[in-house]
Structure formats: structure tokens, C-alpha cells
Amino acid sequence: MAGSERSGPISGKQHSLVASRLASEIQKTINSGLASMKVMKQIDEVIKSNFERKITGILKKIDRLLNSNAKSKLGNRMGLLYVKIVSLQDLVKGSEGGYRLICSPKGRVKVSVIKELLKLDEEIAQYINILYELIPQKTTVKEENLSEAEEIVVDLFSLLNRRENLLRKLKQTKG
């Protein structure tokens, strides 16, 4: 295999560089009302990948905690939280990219819709990051953190449903 050939996910640093470049592209799109379908598809892929990576990290942290807390009352709640987060992960994996749906074949975009989708994705990312930070690496989980994590998961389901409804409306107006 040649040294320049790569397969698999990109590294964290490369991911940040790609995300930064695509953020610049989104800003250009908002300013001009024009976009490339290729760039919109890349934005969809990066956002979905970010969500999936962070959710996988959350599941790994909970899994480690479950091994030491499985038989406690909090362990049962963590197990239920784990199942809910797996459902969130399935929703994210099954979601279709929204940014390419915003782009017409001629490259025009509805700026208001792209702003709305961007706002939703930023909220989803913030909630996922908060959830990640709430779950400790190795120590036992605190009940108040677990309660907050449970509330965040409910909020994430709501945000993901709002995102899906927005995309459904976009598909209906396109088709």
C-alpha cells in the first residue's frame, strides 16, 4: 500500500482543519445564498461524523462506569441512560444530511433554512459536549450528574426530532 493512501477516519487534528474550512464555506453560503452540492455533502458528513464520534465516546465512558456500578441503583439508571444514548446514536446514524437538501441543483440555498439547520446542529453539538463532560472517566457517577444527563438526553431527542421535521419539510418542498 502506498504511503499516501489512507483509509478510515481522519485524525482529530485533520478533522478540526476540515471543520474549520467547512465553517468558512457555510459563512460564504450564508453571505452569497449560493453553494456547491459537493461542499454541502462534505458539511453533512463532518457534522454527522462529529456527532457519532462524541456519542461513541459517551457510550464508552458509561460502559466503563457500568462495570463497577452495575448492581447499584445508580447502575440501573446508568444502564437505562446507556440504552437511550444507543437510540440517539441510531437516530444520528440513520439521519440524512440536511445541508445538501438545502442546495438546489443550480446551487441556490435558502439562507433562512441553512441558518435554522445550523442553529439546531450547534445546539445538538453543545448538548452532546455537555453530556460527554457530565459522565466521569473512571470514578463513580454522582446522582445529580446522572439526573442532568438524563434531562440532556431528553433534550437531544427533541432537538434531533426538530431537525428531522425540518428535513422532512425540505424534502416535501423539493419533491
Image (cartoon, helix red, strand yellow):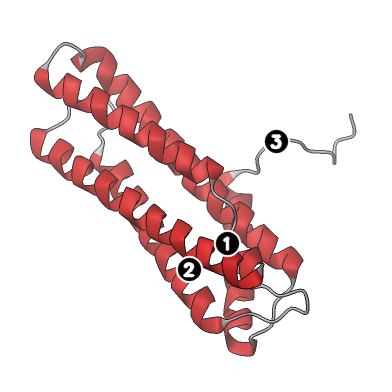
Q: Which of marks 2 and 1 is nearer the N terminus?
A: 1
Disc assigned to residue 117: 2
Q: Earlier in the sequence, mark 3 or mark 1?
A: 3
Position of 86 relative to 69 (above/below): below
SS type, badge 1: loop
Q: Label 3 crowding class (10 Å Cα cut-off): few <14, some 14-19, many 20+?
A: few
Give the residue drawn at x 32%, y 54%: 158
- For residue 93, what is the image quadrant? top right
Position of 62 relative to 7 (above/below): above
Residue 17 visible somewhere in the drawing: no
Judge left or right: residue 166 versus residue 49. left
Q: Which amino acid does label 3 sit on?
A: Gly
The residue that label 3 is drawn on is 8
SS type, badge 2: helix
Q: Earlier in the sequence, mark 3 or mark 2?
A: 3
Judge left or right: residue 37 versus residue 10. right
The residue that label 1 is drawn on is 98
Residue 83 visible somewhere in the drawing: yes
Judge left or right: residue 38 versus residue 139. right
Give the residue drawn at x 68%, y 60%: 41
Measure the C-alpha gap from mark 3 to mark 2. Answer: 28 Å
- For residue 24, what is the image quadrant? bottom right
Q: Label 1 crowding class (10 Å Cα cut-off): few <14, some 14-19, many 20+?
A: many
> Are the residues tagged 2 and 1 within 8 Å (C-beta)?
yes
Residue 155 percent location from the top left of the image: 27, 52
Position of 62 relative to 33 (above/below): above
Towards the viewer: 75 or 165: 165
Measure the C-alpha gap from mark 3 to mark 1. Answer: 23 Å
